Image: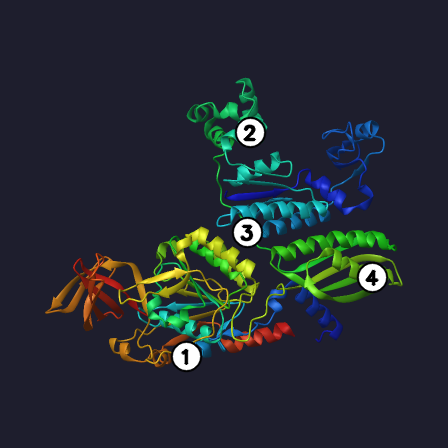
């Protein structure tokens, strides 16, 4: 599991329907082209007998009640914003692959939590009239196909078994490739991948080999990452202007849903909402609502705004609306008087798990120095939920620059005058020694199989730099630099 | 020519709505405990901003600044994350009590380490996140796409965390503050009390300065 995809099928049609209350439950089609050249691009299930590619006149003849609309770029932008914001709630590395389609890099994410979060996001989007589909798979392309094939969401574990029965068109062959492959009797992705890749490449060229890789689910690509929304605002216009409450509330709800998902995606909630109504006489009405409790609860926002708008009488009709949410961090547990708790424990543990998956679970934690004089002896423990108050400073003050270690220590040849190092020569470090201090000898665990003994020197090189040398039975090593 | 107050007010509102993160004043700083560094930064590592400290010479005090930061944040009861790309942090070089609030990420591969830093900067539980890139392969660092740093900038601006990048040469494009540690300490410094030694570090502000930053914030805040 490495990538998740959220995508909205029939994107333009769903965006159109979401932005206009009059289209709910009615046969709708969106068309491209003007006049007699207008052609249906997508049609709702209610528009029986209407298929994409049909001329509008023919479509209207087949379905007399059909509502025909052009695309609505503003509504599409809203839906894309919602899908993208939902993606950011899964993981921070998100690509806007296409309109209404985002791909999320799940590296480091907890699989079970991600599946649960994906299901929850799809449910929220569906409640906001955005019927998105989800897919999880090892590559971005495969995750996209999983979302395409899903009823709601689908996780692909065995790529071969998933891809084999799919039609060849899903691998997006060119027209020429499709014709040639049809002539060979290749109908599905499985038919294509049953052929040797090298032979396909020989006959169809590099593009053919690429097509074969796509059909086998082997195509990988880096994501073009985007940033989450930093300002949480929505603005829209009415043409013609409105004077009733219902159309105002309908659009307000739609935009509030997008803002709420964007806020959640950024790990924030709203503490204030600013509503501006632009009026036909070029004046405006502004009202700021301070929320009783910061949150991203659309129903709560709508109750507050509804209560205000219900009693509002404006001197002119409304031509536009602007809604701005002021973000804040979710209210968290307050620190105790003598302890430091976590502000957002859920995010903390989730992010540590994510970091652990990136670098290794054994490489993240709070270091605790072991009770031994053995050099570099420590353990990593789980960070504390509550950090105890600081202790009194140590009686003996720490001296000198802090050591930064080289792990593993660098092997080095050391020329000595007696026991004293005079010159170093190694792949990582070489030079004459200006001053040296030592030796400091330590040993331990001699009563066990893990006995150790080391002699330390601190040296200053002619070119500058203070280093710690360790001399053991295995030879000399540079353990680190005092920096 | 003077603009009407209402126009100015409208412009300020527009800017505040369009760029809320730019208009926000830094919500305090995180003192490092090194007087020269704190003085140069106007009190400490600014929250919501990237700061880069370049250890231009070996033994110029970069690790000592990190150790002092751990002690100072422990005293202030703040949490710190250290994303240690080259796995060079030595826990035994810091008082044991100054480790209790630390989350140490021991890097292995540069890309994964930077992804870990990206996650922690967005976490919201840390007062400071230190990304230590000293000891990493210079060629790999040079090949990092600018988008990596842009993304880190944006993530930092959106949070209240102070992010410190430690490097051996200037690395972060458009960083608001860059300090250079340029003077290698002699062997005799091993006997000096660390607090006194930290006060003697040679710190040069190479980019940005506290007063200019504050003025900029004032101007934006109107």
The residues bearing labels 1 and 3 have C-alpha atoms spaced at a distance of 41 Å
Residue occupied by mark 2? A173
Of label 2 and label 1, which has the lower sequence position?
2
Q: Position of residue B174 (x, y in %)?
A: 49, 64
The residues bearing labels 1 and 4 have C-alpha atoms spaced at a distance of 57 Å
The residues bearing labels 2 and 4 have C-alpha atoms spaced at a distance of 55 Å
Residue occupied by mark 1? A392
Residue A60 vertical placement versus A258 (above, below) = above
SS of the residue at dot 1? Answer: loop
Picture quadrant of residue A330:
bottom right
Question: Which label was assigned to residue A307?
Answer: 4
The residues bearing labels 2 and 1 have C-alpha atoms spaced at a distance of 71 Å
Query: What's the chain of the residue with tag 3?
Result: A
Q: Are marks 3 and 2 in contact (CB under 8 Å)?
A: no
SS of the residue at dot 4? Answer: helix
Q: Are marks 2 and 4 on the same chain?
A: yes
Q: Position of residue A256 (x, y in %)?
A: 73, 55
Q: Position of residue A271 (x, y in %)?
A: 68, 65
For image coordinates 16% across by 68% down, the residue present is A421
Please say whether residue B143 is visible from this viewpoint. no
From the viewer's side, name the closer residue of B107 and A284: B107
Q: Position of residue A474 (x, y in %)?
A: 17, 57
Query: What's the chain of the residue with tag 1?
Result: A
Question: Which label was assigned to residue A242?
Answer: none
Of label 1 and label 4, which has the lower sequence position?
4
Of label 4 and label 3, which has the lower sequence position?
3
């Amino acid at each position: 599991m490495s990538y998740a995809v959220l995508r909205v099928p029939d994107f333009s049609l769903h965006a159109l329907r979401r932005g206009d209350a009059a289209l709910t439950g009615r046969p709708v089609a969106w068309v491209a082209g003007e006049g007699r050249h207008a052609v249906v691009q997508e049609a709702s299930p209610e528009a029986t007998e209407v298929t994409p590619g049909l001329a509008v006149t023919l479509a209207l003849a087949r379905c007399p009640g059909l509502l025909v609309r052009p695309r609505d770029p503003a509504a599409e932008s809203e839906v894309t914003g919602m899908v993208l914001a939902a993606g950011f709630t899964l993981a921070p590395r998100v690509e806007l692959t296409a309109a209404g389609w985002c791909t999320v890099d799940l590296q480091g994410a907890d699989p079970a939590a991600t599946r649960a979060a994906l299901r929850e996001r799809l449910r929220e989007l569906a409640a906001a009239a955005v019927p998105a589909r989800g897919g999880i798979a090892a590559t971005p392309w495969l995750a996209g196909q999983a979302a395409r094939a899903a009823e709601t969401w689908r996780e692909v574990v065995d790529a071969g078994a998933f891809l084999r029965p799919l039609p060849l068109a899903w691998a997006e062959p060119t027209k020429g490739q499709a014709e040639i492959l049809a002539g060979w009797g290749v109908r599905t992705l499985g038919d294509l991948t049953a052929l040797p890749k090298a032979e396909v490449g020989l006959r169809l060229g590099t593009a053919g080999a690429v097509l074969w890789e796509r059909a086998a689910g082997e195509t990988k690509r880096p994501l073009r990452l985007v940033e989450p929304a930093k300002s949480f605002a929505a603005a829209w216009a009415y043409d013609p202007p409105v004077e009733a409450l219902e159309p105002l509330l309908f659009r307000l709800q739609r935009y509030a849903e997008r803002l709420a998902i964007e806020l959640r995606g950024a790990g924030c909630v709203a503490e204030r909402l600013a509503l501006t109504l632009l009026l036909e006489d070029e004046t405006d009405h502004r009202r700021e609502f301070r929320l009783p409790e910061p949150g991203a609860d659309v129903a709560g926002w709508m109750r507050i705004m509804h209560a205000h708008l219900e009693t509002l009488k404006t001197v002119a009709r409304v031509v536009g609306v602007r809604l701005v949410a002021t973000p804040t961090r979710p209210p968290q547990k307050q620190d105790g008087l003598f302890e430091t708790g976590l502000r957002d424990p859920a995010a903390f543990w989730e992010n540590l798990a994510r970091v652990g998956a990136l670098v290794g679970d054994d490489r993240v934690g709070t270091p605790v120095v072991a009770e031994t004089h053995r050099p570099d002896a420590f353990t990593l423990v789980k960070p504390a939920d509550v950090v105890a108050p600081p202790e009194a400073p140590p009686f003996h003050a720490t001296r000198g620059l802090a050591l930064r270690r080289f792990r593993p220590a660098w092997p080095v040849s050391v020329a000595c005058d007696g026991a004293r190092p005079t010159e170093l020569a190694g792949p990582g470090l070489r030079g004459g020694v200006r001053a040296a201090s030592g030796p400091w000898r330590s040993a331990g665990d001699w009563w066990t199989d893990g006995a150790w003994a080391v002699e330390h020197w601190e040296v200053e090189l002619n070119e500058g730099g203070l280093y710690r040398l360790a001399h053991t039975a295995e030879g000399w090593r540079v353990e680190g630099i005092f920096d | 020519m003077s603009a009407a107050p209402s126009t100015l007010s409208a412009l300020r509102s527009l800017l505040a709505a369009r760029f809320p993160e730019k208009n926000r004043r830094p919500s305090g700083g995180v003192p490092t405990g090194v007087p020269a560094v704190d003085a140069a930064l106007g009190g400490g590592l600014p929250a919501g901003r990237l700061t880069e400290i370049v250890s231009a010479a070996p033994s110029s005090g970069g690790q000592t600044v990190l150790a002092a930061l751990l002690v100072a944040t422990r005293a202030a009861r703040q949490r710190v994350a250290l994303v240690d790309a080259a796995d060079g942090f030595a826990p035994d070089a810091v008082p044991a009590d100054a480790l209790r609030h630390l989350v140490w990420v021991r890097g292995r591969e540069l890309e994964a380490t930077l992804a870990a830093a990206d996650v922690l900067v967005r976490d919201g539980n840390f007062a400071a996140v230190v990304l230590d890139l000293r000891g990493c392969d210079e060629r790999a660092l040079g090949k990092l796409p600018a988008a990596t740093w842009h993304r880190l900038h944006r993530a930092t601006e959106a949070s209240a965390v102070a992010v410190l990048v430690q490097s051996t040469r200037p690395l972060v494009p458009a960083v608001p503050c860059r300090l250079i540690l340029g003077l290698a300490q002699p062997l005799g410094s091993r006997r000096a009390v660390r607090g006194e030694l930290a006060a003697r570090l040679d710190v040069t502000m190479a980019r940005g300065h506290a007063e200019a930053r504050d003025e900029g914030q004032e101007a934006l805040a109107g």
